[in-house]
Amino acid sequence: MAMLMAMGAALTPPALGQNDAGSNQAAVALDDNGLRREVERRWREAGGLNERLRVEVRDARALLTGRAANPDERVTGVRLAWQVDGLKEVINEIGIGDESGLSDRATDMWITAQLRKDLMTDPEITSSNFTIETVNQVIYLMGRARSPQELERVRNHAREIARVRRVVSHVQVPN
């Protein structure tokens, strides 16, 4: 028994690095994934909202996108997200009515891929600090910029992509 306990202790991963705020970055990411899954679960149980709506969670802030069938469905999606313990903020960017077809979804995926590539190849941007969601050619940004200048670079990259209708930023910037 003592040998098993010693092996378990030996297999326990070392303490993970701390970020500037003192919280464990890996634990935050796991929490964000768990929060996202919980919102999706509630939407699924509410009659398949998860098929029309999307949620991205970063730093316990949930960005809701997609297209609700009607205003009541939109309210239900937001209400269910707010009921998830641990979310600090729910950002409602859910549209009403389905404007998108298969080609629109492919365009959205292409736009997201282009912006991700642009951010990854720009040495003045820490691309991993940003979450990108594109719906009906509207880019939604979340995350944390290191400076106002970095955020402006990200926005400029997004605006330069063909077929982008609008760029909406929910990025936090330090004072």
Image: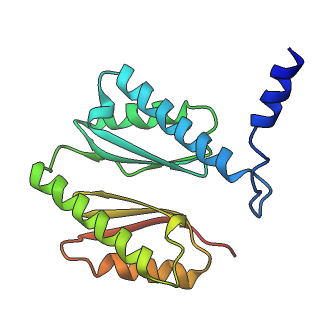
160 shown above or below 99: below
What residue appears at the point 10 percent right and 55 percent down from the top-left corner? 103
- Give the image quarter of residue 17: bottom right
Left or right, residue 154 beside residue 21: left
What residue appears at the point 55 percent right and 30 percent down from the top-left corner? 83
Left or right, residue 102 beside residue 109: left
**Foreground of the two, 34 or 69:** 34
**Foreground of the two, 99 or 13:** 13
Furthest toward the top, the residue is 1
What residue appears at the point 24 percent right and 36 percent down from the top-left corner? 70
- Residue 55 coordinates in the image, percent (x, y): 41, 44
Furthest toward the right, the residue is 2
- Residue 137 coordinates in the image, percent (x, y): 23, 63
How many numbered marks appear?
Answer: 0
Screen quadrant of the C terminus = bottom right
- Residue 75 coordinates in the image, percent (x, y): 38, 35
- Give the image quarter of residue 41: top left
What residue appears at the point 80 percent right and 28 percent down from the top-left corner? 7
79 shown above or below 94: above
Furthest toward the front, the residue is 3
113 shown above or below 6: below
Left or right, residue 34 beside residue 94: right
- Residue 142 coordinates in the image, percent (x, y): 49, 61
Left or right, residue 130 beside residue 167: right
**Foreground of the two, 113 or 55:** 113
Screen quadrant of the N terminus = top right
Colour mapping: rainbow
